[in-house]
Image (cartoon, rainbow, N blue to C red):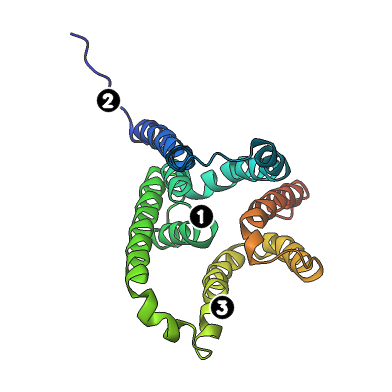
Amino acid sequence: MKEKKQLSYLESVHRDGRVWGIIITILLFSFPVLVSLIFDASPNMPVLLKGLLATAPMYWAVGLVEIFTYVPMLGAGGTYLSFVTGNISNLKLPCAIDAMNRAEVSAQSEEGEVISTIAISVSSIVTTLIIILGVIGIVPLTPVLESPVLKPAFDMILPALFGGLAVVFISKNLKLSIAPIILMLVLFIFVPALNAGTVGIMVPVGVVFTVLVARILYKKGVL
C-alpha cells in the first residue's frame, strides 16, 4: 500500500486556502441568487450589466494588484484568511505587521507565516465578538456614541493606528519613505475625490509606487 505523502505547512495552507476561498465564493453568490428565487425578484439584467461594466473593471484591477501587494506583507496563510474575512487595509494588515514586528520575523519566513495567520485569526474573532456586542448594545449606546464629545476621538482612530505603524516603518528606512509620503500628501490634498473610502485603492497604488522608487534608488546606489 502506497504511503500517503505528508504535506508541508505551506502546501496545507495553499490547499485549505483554495478550498475555503471556493466555499466563500459560492456562499457569496448563493445569497443574492436565493433571495431572487425566494422573493421572485430577479434583477433587471441590462441595468445590472451596465452597472457592472462601469464598476467591475476597477475592482478587478484593484483585486489583482492587491494579490501582489498583500502576499509579501501577510504571507500565504494571512492573505487567504484576510481575503475571506475582509477589511484588510484597516484592520488585518496593521495587526499582522505589528505582530511580526514584535516577534522580529518576516512574512517570508515560516515563523512569520504562522504569526501573521494567528494575528489575523485573532483579529477576525475579536472583530466578530465586538460586532455581536455592538448589535446587542447599539440602541442603548447610540446616544453615547453619537455624543459630540466622543466624535473627534472616533474620527481619529484609524489615523492614530496608521500613524503608529508609520513611525516604525519610516524610522527603518527614511530615504525610501520620503517619496510615497509626498505622493500621498499631494494626491489627498489636491484631489478632492480621494477620501477615506478610497483607502483600499490607494494602498496598492502606494505600494507599487514605492517598489518602483525603491528600484530606482537601488540602481543609483542610494539604498
Q: Quadrant of the N terminus?
A: top left
Q: Secondary structure at mark 2?
A: loop
Where residue 91 sits: x, y (%)?
Answer: 48, 61
- Which numbered disc, 2 or 3, marks the residue that appears first in the sequence? 2
Residue found at the very far front of the displayed protein: 40
Task: Find disc 2 in the rendering and name its residue.
Answer: 6
Q: Are marks 2 and 3 in contact (CB under 8 Å)?
A: no
Q: Write down the residue under mark 3.
A: 155
Q: Nearer the viewer, residue 137 or 206?
A: 137
Q: Which residue is mark 1?
A: 88
Q: Earlier in the sequence, mark 1 or mark 3?
A: 1
Between marks 2 and 3 in the image, the one whose residue lies nearer the viewer: 3
Q: Determine the CA span between mark 1 and mark 3.
A: 19 Å
Q: Is residue 160 above or below residue 211?
A: below
Image point 43% across, 37% down: which residue?
21
**Label 2: few (<14), some (14–19) or many (≥20) C-alpha neighbours in 10 Å:** few
Q: Nearer the viewer, residue 207 or 178?
A: 207
Q: Considering only vertical position in the picture, is 12 above or below 41?
A: above
Cα–Cα span, label 2 and label 3: 49 Å
Q: Nearer the viewer, residue 3 or 29?
A: 29
